Amino acid sequence: MNESEPNSLSVWRDLSTHQRQVAPLHMRDLFAADANRGQRFSLQACELFLDYSKNRITEESMTLLVELARQTGVEAWRDRMFAGDIVNTSEQRAALHVALRQPPGRQFPSAAGDVMP
């Protein structure tokens, strides 16, 4: 996990360059060039539908964003948050809002003890 500032990473500079390249693109041109754009740049999970096809995003954008997430340790921070570890560094405590999504009757691990009641 890279604890440095994200904007000091080379992938950040790559994203900045990429943003300048896609900024002048028009949505109608992106959709005209890719008949499956709506499907490729959207997803559905449970009852949530996320459509990001109407943004200036490309396969390269996605690759760069995933690499930025990898280099900054997003997955490890997510895992720590769901484990009840201290991830709120300004208040030195767990981010307990994730406990709200626990099924009834299940405990949530936290240094503060059982936060579910």
Image (spheres, rainbow, N blue to C red):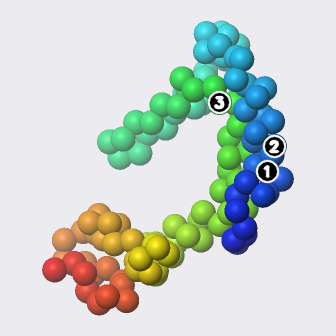
Q: Residues within 10 Å of mark 2 (few under 14, many from 20)?
A: some
Q: Residues within 10 Å of mark 3 (few under 14, many from 20)?
A: some
In this figure, which residue is indicated by the disc labeled 3? 57
In this figure, which residue is indicated by the disc labeled 2? 14
6 vs 46, nearest the viewer = 6
Identify the amino acid type marked 2. Answer: Asp
Give the label on residue 11, or none.
Answer: 1
Q: Disc 3 or disc 2, which is closer to the eye?
A: 2
Q: Position of residue 91 (x, y in %)?
A: 41, 77
When asked about the image quadrant of residue 6, the answer is bottom right
Q: Secondary structure at mark 2?
A: helix
Pointer 3 or 2: first along the chain: 2
- Any part of residue 31 in sight: no
Looking at the image, the residue that sits furthest to the front is: 90
* Residue in view at x 70 percent, y 23 percent: 23
The reply to whether discs 1 and 2 touch (Cβ–Cβ < 8 Å) is yes
